[in-house]
Image (cartoon, rainbow, N blue to C red):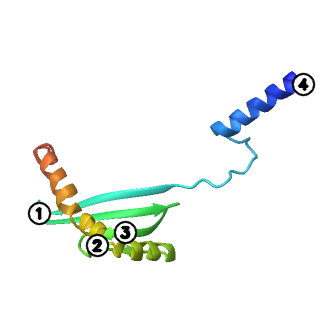
């Protein structure tokens, strides 16, 4: 009885800790959500563009583009999310200000390093 309980405990621990399955076993679903923020600079800070992409399982479902000023859905679920986020004026103002807060700030911090390397 003691060995059986110990074996059961080890099995539960391996499952909980995420031990890899046996070679022939099929993986259950692995899901990944990713958010990517990009700053596009044209002619220094004369023209800047901020893009934020939301990706689920290697498929972009919604994105924000500072040139458009709104979230745009790429899938049916993304369209629903975009409508919800676009309906909140405070959230949208925060997103629209990301060009100055994120891109312009990072450009000023990294210009001395990046421009000097040309």
Label ID, residue 97: none
In this picture, residue 1 sits left or right of residue 7 = right
Label 2 vs label 4, nearer the camera? 2
Which residue is identified by label 2? 89
Badge 3 marks a residue whose secondary structure is strand
Q: Which residue is mark 3?
A: 63
Label 2 element class: helix
Q: CA distance from mark 3 to mark 2?
A: 17 Å
Q: Quadrant of residue 102?
A: bottom left
Q: CA distance from mark 1 to mark 4?
A: 74 Å
Q: Between marks 2 and 4, how big is the CA–CA gap? A: 63 Å
How many other residues sit within 10 Å of disc 1, few (<14), some (14-19) or many (≥20)? Answer: few
Q: Which corner quadrant of the image does residue 2 belong to?
A: top right
**Alpha carbon of mark 2 to alpha carbon of mark 1: how far?**
31 Å
Residue at (37%, 75%) from the top-left corner?
Answer: 72
Q: Position of residue 34 (x, y in %)?
A: 44, 56
From the viewer's perspective, is residue 87 above or below residue 38?
Answer: below
- Label annotation for residue 1: 4
**Along the line of sight, the residue nearer the viewer: 91 or 95:** 91
Foreground: disc 2 or disc 1: 2
Residue 43: which numbered mark, if any?
Answer: 1
Taking the spot 80% from the left edge, 25% from the top edge, the residue there is 6
């Amino acid at each position: 009885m003691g060995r059986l309980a110990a074996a059961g405990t080890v099995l539960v621990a391996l499952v909980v800790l995420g031990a890899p399955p046996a070679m022939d076993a099929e993986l259950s679903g692995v899901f990944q959500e990713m958010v990517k923020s990009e700053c596009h600079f044209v002619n220094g800070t004369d023209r800047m563009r901020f893009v934020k992409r939301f990706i689920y399982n290697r498929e972009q479902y919604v994105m924000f583009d500072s040139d458009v000023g709104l979230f745009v859905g790429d899938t049916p679920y993304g369209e629903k999310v975009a409508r919800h986020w676009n309906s909140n004026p405070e959230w949208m103002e925060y997103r629209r200000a990301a060009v100055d807060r994120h891109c312009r700030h990072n450009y000023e911090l990294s210009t001395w390093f990046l421009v000097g390397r040309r």
